Amino acid sequence: MVSAAEQMAANTSWAALGKATDLRKRIFFTLGLLVVYRLGTFIPVPGIDGVELRAFMDGAASGIGGMLSMFTGGALGRMGVFALGIMPYISASIIVQLMTSMVPALEQLKKEGEQGRKKINQYTRYGTVFLATLQSYGLAVSLQSGDLVTNPGGFFIASCMITLVGGTMFLMWLGEQITQRGIGNGISLIIFVGIIAEVPAALAQFLASGRSGAISPAVIIGVIVMVIGAIAFIVFMERSLRKIHIQYPRRQVGMKVYDGGSSHLPIKINPSGVIPPIFASSLLLLPATISTFSGAQSTNPIMSTVLAYFGPGQPLYLLFFAIMVVFFTYFYTYNVAFKTDDVADNLKNQNGFVPGIRPGKKTTEYLDYVVARILVLGSAYLTAICLLPEILRAQFAIPFYFGGTSVLIVVSVTMDTIQQVQSHLLAHQYEGLIEKSQLSGKGKRRARRKGAARR
């Protein structure tokens, strides 16, 4: 049965967007920062040989270089100031969240509320600087050894490191500003815009390959059908819920006795959203970033063996990708997205309970049991949607932008952003109803006063 809030959200008209001034400001603020991000991907790092870089990336576009360029919005292919993208921040977030669950001091910080969260965010920023420094140094040395630099030397390495680390920190700041003052999740939107901006060029190249005969028309039609089917499946799974019945007992306030009510606790099939595939991709792309530009796969036998088995579409790559997606689905859900102990405590404080389950520890155990069973389906869904298109893509040379991870990110971020916009519109509609009720109340009181004065 649809709740009153859900029914009201469904009936919310997008025409109300013109009246919601605060929401309009948030949308324009978000669009403005995303435009700044896209402009930054075209500003090159000083000292790069553009001709050699373009020739190198054309040869690497079908391999790991294409995936790296996809997650950086094309900035890595152009060696822009945002060439490292947001991946160092994501990697630092993974490390800090893992340490939070293992180190008692950090776990205590997490329980301290807003102050603890600020300290953990600060540690994440420090980790981002450290990882971005390491990656920028490795990338600068790799570019220099790959003869992609006009004036190699210590000055180029220093300037490249400063530029890339500064670009990553600026991207992190943009993402935080979008999350706080804009609409949607800033980090996810940055990755989303990077993928969307490169899709037209990838689509044109894909269709050109079909015209030249490199790809058969049956494969092109199959890819289109696969993408449409993946979008429909993602929308269905992301909207799927498991509703747990919640009962509230009778309560007495003063001399009045209020009847107990009932509600439900919604648990999504995939509470972690797009975080597991992003986390898994960022970890798998770390070693490949350096080896791609340094040419180590052709000179170092160990690196060439590792990349041969861990390249996109290879069995070991798919196996580790699936393992990490499943791991991060469970880890992120239990530690961030749906913490069962906090949910049980909130229900207990509100005098709510699951019928047949005692409040407190028993409720936590019951929620753990339900969430664990739900995540079996959720993690299987994420693994399938990420791996099956990857296998087909590797077999038929389909661009990375039509893979399962990119489609999942685009669809999920779009749905999340639209949902947040509808939430703001719904809040604006509630505010309008409250103001109208207050105004009508004031009008009735004035009419009563006038009537009393006449008497």
Image (cartoon, rainbow, N blue to C red):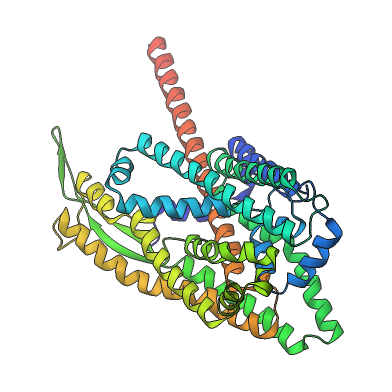
Q: Going by the image, does 110 lie left or right of 271?
A: left
User: 85 or 444: which is nearer to us?
Assistant: 85
User: 73 or 407: which is nearer to us?
Assistant: 73
Q: Residue at x 57, y 55 (%)?
A: 87
Q: Quadrant of residue 392?
A: bottom right
Q: Residue at x 61, y 42 (%)?
A: 174
Q: Going by the image, does 373 lie left or right of 161?
A: left
Q: Going by the image, does 246 lie left or right of 271?
A: left
Quadrant holding the N terminus: bottom left
| Residue 150 seen by the camera | yes
User: 447 or 158: which is nearer to us?
Assistant: 158
Q: Going by the image, does 259 lie left or right of 161?
A: left
User: 261 or 279: which is nearer to us?
Assistant: 279
Q: Residue at x 43, y 14 (%)?
A: 450
Quadrant holding the C terminus: top left
Residue 67 is situated, as x and y percent measured from the top left of the image, at 65, 67
| Residue 74 seen by the camera | no
